Image (cartoon, rainbow, N blue to C red):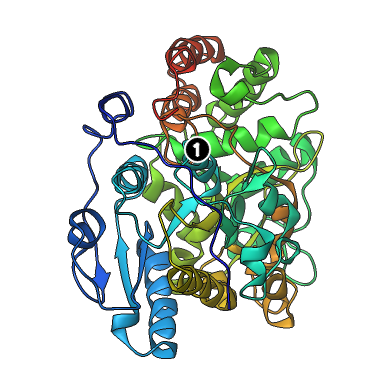
Amino acid sequence: MTSSPPAPRRRALTRRSLLHGGLAAGGLGLAATASGCGTPFAAGVAGTQLAPGTVTFWNLFGGGDGARLQLMLEQYEQQHGGSDALQASTFAWGNPYYTKVSLATLGDKPPDVAVAHATRATNLARAGLLTEITEEMLASVGLSSTDFTPKVWESTVLDGRAYAIPLDTHPFVLFYNKTVCRDAGLLDADDELVPIQGTEQWEAALTAAKEVTGAYGASVATVSETATPWRFFQTLYSQRNGSTPFLSDGGTELTFDEALVADTLAYLQGLTGSGLMPQATDYAGSQTLMFTGQSAFYLQGEWEITTAQSVEGLEFGMVPVPTLFDQPACQADSHAFVLPTMERTPDQFERAMGFVKSMLDQSLAWAEGGHVPAYLPALRSPEYAAMEPQSDYAEAADYAVYDAPAWYSGSGSNFENIVGAQIGLVMQGIASPEEAIASMRSQLGTYARTADPLS
């Protein structure tokens, strides 16, 4: 017998919420797939009846993540009587997804369970759109907050209360082409990358690799993309003593250390300006350079392991981004399960928590796609330790750096779009660090002065 979850805080669907929150104009991102009864829009917004006992689940996973998730969902269905046990819907990544979750919750028609990035879950919680996750709720399915990586669990906490159940950490990492690195003398006797420490060793490694490739030492996306430049910059900036959060006080203050930001930007510009890394390459182009041996290294989120594995004949490895400055750090976020605010019966609550537990129990299947398990029984298992190259960068989860909290920050946010675009311009050699900082301040200042539209 399980108890009901804490009484939810409720907010009315108001014109101010819609207009100032961008919910009316932001789009719903309805390109979706579903299993079970009904359709995503009908069930989530129009209130179409579902089969009794159906769990509704919304997510934003595409590509390899989406394929793996589908296998996990099928496992849940098999264990709970078939397709009527679950209605799973996938929506467009980023702001459109979070707009839809917010709209549905404000309209009292949310899914039972949804996926959220940890950096976006706290925004939803601050707006009263999520049910608090208590120890009692976790215990109802045999879980505890101590079952999760401490760093990840902390990312779900707002004002001392947790609002999400983490599934993973997805850090920014370093991929390396073993063939190029072997020829450049960068591998050890076990055919693994020799550890790199400091900017001098990093630049020496890139120089040796460039001599082998005849093109570049490393590659990272700089054009037609904003998240990747931000992730690379935030990784190196956070490695520096004295680095302060970009935002404070819920995003109302810009508190980054301007001198360190300028110096870090100048360092990135030096890497591309010297030809060790390309000045202008997009997301697909940056990985193609490493996959085809035109660069030894490639910087991106670990989820691109699926793409690398699909390249015939490619020998590659993955490690945490080297510590080039004072301390290890890497930009990261986490996928987590949230329970949107709604009135739940004890049975609905039990089914929702049971679904989450089923997904956590399949963490090793999820880890095959590169994500580091947040669930400690999976992370510490012999099966995960034997999983290569996944386990080779797992330590990055211990020093993950999450985006500073604000209503306009987090994965796929306006903050990342603004700051990432300016970092990209610096790496392309189009803007100076000082020009980029001035633009960041000007654009972010508008958001910092704007009240949270859902508060």
Picture coordinates of residue 395, whole percent (x, y): 74, 58
As drawn, is 73 to the left or to the right of 87? right
As drawn, is 38 to the left or to the right of 444? left
**Between residues 335 and 304, which one lies in front from this camera angle?**
335
**Badge 1: residue crowd in 10 Å (few <14, some 14–19, many ≥20):** many
Picture coordinates of residue 83, whole percent (x, y): 30, 83
Residue in the picture at 35% in, 59% down: 111
Q: Quadrant of the C terminus?
A: top left
**Between residues 223 and 90, which one lies in front from this camera angle?**
90
Residue in the picture at 59% in, 16% down: 254
Q: Is residue 39 above or below residue 281?
A: below
Q: Quadrant of the N terminus?
A: bottom right
Q: Is residue 215 above or below residue 177?
A: above
Whether residue 23 is visible, yes or no, is yes
Find disc 1 in the rendering and name its residue: 123
Picture coordinates of residue 12, whole percent (x, y): 33, 36
Q: How many marks?
A: 1
> Could you say whether the residue bearing mark 1 is in a helix, strand or loop?
helix
* Amino acid type, callout 1: Asn
Residue in the picture at 77% in, 43% down: 328
Picture coordinates of residue 113, whole percent (x, y): 43, 62
Residue in the picture at 52% in, 75% down: 354
Give residue 434's quadrant in the image. top right
Whether residue 248 is visible, yes or no, is no
